Image (cartoon, rainbow, N blue to C red):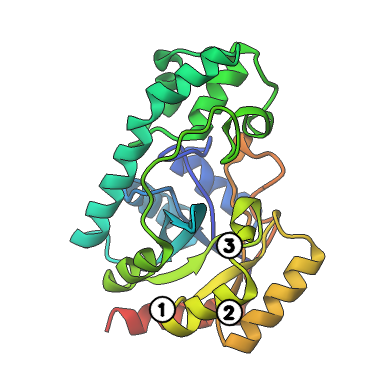
Amino acid sequence: MRIDLHSHTTVSDGTDSPDELLALAKAIGLDVLAVTDHDTFDHLPAVRAAAKREGIELVEGMELSCELAGKSVHLLAYGMDPHSDGLRMEMKRIRAGRSDRLPRMLERLTELGVPVTREEVLAQVGEAPSIGRPHIADALVLRGHVASRDEAFRRFLADDGPAYVPRYHPDVRTGIELIHDAGGVAVIAHPWGRSSRQVLTEEMLTQLVADHGLDGFEVDHEDHDADARRRLRALATELEALGTGSSDHHGAGKPTMQLGCNLTDPEVYARLRARIGQSSD
C-alpha cells in the first residue's frame, strides 16, 4: 500500500487543481492520499469527488499555521470535523492575518528594488481563500526578479528575510487542542525543516506528546536529511507517536517535492486511522 499524507492544491498554494492532483495520484500508483491545504476546508468537496472518481482512498485533512516561541510551526489535521466552530473561527483569523500584511510586504519588496503589484499577486491566488507568501513568490517569478519560489523565499520572503512581515498564528499547543476538539488527529509537519527545528527540539516534541496529546510528527520529508529521519523515527518509536512520511507536494511550486517521494508505513497509517476512529467516538 502506497500512502502519502501531505499534499496541496490550488485551493491553497499548490499548482495542481484537485482533479489534477487526484489524477496524478492514480497515475503514480498511490492507494491513499491526504490533501492538506493551508488553513481552509474549501478543498474538501472537490477532492472528495475526485478521489471517488479515481478510486483513491482519501484522508480528509488540513494544514494549520501555528507558532512556537516566535517560529512558524505547521500542524497537519486529519479526520477532523470541518464544521467545528472553534477550528473554523481560528482559520478565519489566520487567513485575515495573511491578507492584512500584504501591503507592508509589497512596500518592502519595492524598497528592495523588486516591486510587484497587488494585482499581480492576486492573479496568482486563484481558488485559494487567502493570500500566502508562495503567491507573492510566484508574482516575483513572473516579473523576472527571481527564477523560482525557492529563490524568492531564500532572498526575500523567508521568516528571517528582508521582506518578511509577521502575522497572527495560534500557539501550537492551542492548535493541537483545536484539532482534537474537532475530532481530528494532530501531526507536526516537517518538524526539523526550515526555522521550526530551532524550537522543536527532542525535548519539546516529547513535551507536546506527553502534556498536550500531540499524535505524531513527520519523519520522512524532503526537508529532513538521513540523520534527522533516523533520530525522529527513534523518537516516535520511544514516544509511541505516529512517525509519518509524505511528499508535501505543491506541484510546480516545489519541484523537488514530487507526489509520492516519501511514503507512510501502512502500519503507521493503520494506527492513524484507529486514532481518527477514537476521536470521532
Q: Position of residue 91 (x, y in %)?
A: 30, 50
Q: Classify 47 as above or below 151.
A: below
Q: Amino acid at mark 2?
A: Val
Residue highlighted by disc 1 = 212
Which residue is nearer to you in this view: 32 or 9? 9
Label for residue 180?
A: none
Tell me the distance, in whole angstroms, between the alpha carbons under discs 1 and 3.
Answer: 16 Å
Residue highlighted by disc 3 = 199
Tell me the distance, in whole angstroms, between the alpha carbons under discs 1 and 2.
Answer: 20 Å
Please report whichever mark, 1 or 3, sits nearer to the chain's N-terminal start. Answer: 3
Which residue is nearer to you in this view: 184 or 140? 140
Residue at the image point whose x is 57% and y is 64% from the top? 31
Comparing labels 1 and 3, the label whose residue is closer to the camera: 3
Q: Classify 16 as above or below 244.
A: above
Q: Classify 278 as above or below 60.
A: below
Outermost residue toward the front in this view: 69
Q: Is residue 146 left or right of residue 133?
A: right
Which residue is nearer to you in this view: 270 or 132? 132
Label for residue 268?
A: 2
Comparing labels 1 and 2, the label whose residue is closer to the camera: 1
Q: Amino acid at mark 3?
A: Val
Quadrant location, the C terminus: bottom left
The crowd level at tag 1 (other Cα within 10 Å; few <14, some 14-19, many 20+) is: some
The crowd level at tag 2 (other Cα within 10 Å; few <14, some 14-19, many 20+) is: some
